Amino acid sequence: MNNFLNTIILDNPIRDYMILLLVLLFVSFVKRYISKIVAALLFRLVKHWSPQIEEKSFVELLLKPLEFFFLLITFMFTIDRFTFPRILNVNVYGHVSLQNVTDTLLELAFTASIIWIILRLIDFIALVLEKKADSTSDRTDKQFVIFFRDFFKAIIFIMGAIAFIRILFGVGLVEKIVAGLGIGAAALALAAKESIENLIGSFIIFFDKPFRVGDTVKVDSYQGTVEKIGLRSTRIRTLEKTFVTVPNKKMVDSILDNLSLRTQQRVNMKLEMTADTPADSILGALQDIRQLLDSNSNVLKGYTVNLHDFNKDTVIIQVIFNTMILDGTQYAALRESVNLSILHILEKRSIKMPGSSTNVVLTNAN
């Protein structure tokens, strides 16, 4: 039996292959339990951040990356005692041998597992902050969490890409890339000018808060509700229910009207009457309209009802009043009620509005 276990195959005894196989099988069976134990221990360290987060949610986030990490670490430590077979140690490309390739692949896999775990930890931190944001009425807090979750993930991906380049091509190439970026920084900045401006615009939006998710805004010719604020752009659901994407730079630089921040809604009406309307009828109509606005609880004090102007054709009454902030249906109903009441007042006072007419004069030609 010993002779069989000591038999050399590819420069390594069968015993080592058996140990490697048994260790990997054992770890494959227990990796889930070990991962759950480690995740549970980590959860006890961070659970005070957000007591409402369940342990199951945290474990589910870290379970798969931890399983992969433990299996990979076990394989790397076990395979380290092996001698790479000389017969397989051939040059794959130039001076790069097959052993160099396998070592590089293991380094890449290890780096990927670390990045995977870090990304899941970012997801957990974002989950904690989202739970806290749910307890507030400000929807921007949750969008703020999503924004920075994506931002930090992008940073980790960039750092991971640099680590991969370093593993594949060595430190020298990384230094050359950094030097090249320094030389071509102006060209790179010029090419990415719009993207950088939009990214800066997104930071301005989140910190200055000219608007929030859920606000109704008007920018240029677009009016609608803000549904999402991203790294590059803001998404607006318009009144026509279309989905408009506006670059964050434009949202910051343009004149933006945040309709949700209005404290009152203003109504400005001009009533035109025929020039032959008696002055007493006009005075009576003015008094009746003032009484109408006084009796309406949704109309705020400080309204204006006056004889605004007149000329040879028309007499103009101006009606200006402010209302409390009402939703679209209530506001339309209020306007309809006031307009109908004013029409009844004009009818009661026998006041006519000017209309177009055509006079036809017939003459006898003798």
Image (cartoon, helix red, strand yellow):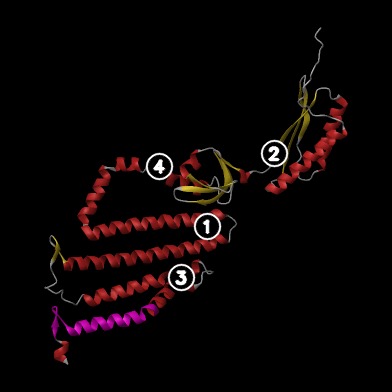
Q: Which residue is mark 1?
A: 142
Vertical order, 20 against 157 (above or below): below
Residue on which disc 2 sits: 266
Where the N terminus falls, by quadrant? bottom left
Q: Residue at coordinates 88% horizontally, 26% vertically from top-left?
A: 280
Mark sitting earlier along the chain (4/2): 4
Residue on which disc 4 sits: 194
Q: Residue furthest bottom?
A: 1
Q: Nearer the viewer, residue 121 or 363?
A: 363
Q: Residues within 10 Å of mark 2 (few under 14, many from 20)?
A: some
Report if the CB atoms under discs 4 and 1 are less than 8 Å apart.
no
Q: Which residue is mark 3?
A: 58
Residue 122: % across, % down: 42, 62
Q: Earlier in the sequence, mark 2 or mark 3?
A: 3
- Between disc 2 and disc 3, the foreground one is 2
Disc 4 vs disc 1: which is toward the camera? 4
- Asked if the stretch drawn in magenta spans residue 24, the answer is yes
Disc with the residue nearer the chain's start (4 vs 1)? 1
Q: Amino acid at mark 3?
A: Phe
Foreground residue, 316 or 27?
316
Residue 290 seen in render: no
Looking at the rendered structure, the secondary structure element under dot 1 is helix
Q: Residue at x 50, y 49 (%)?
A: 206
Q: Amino acid at mark 4?
A: Glu
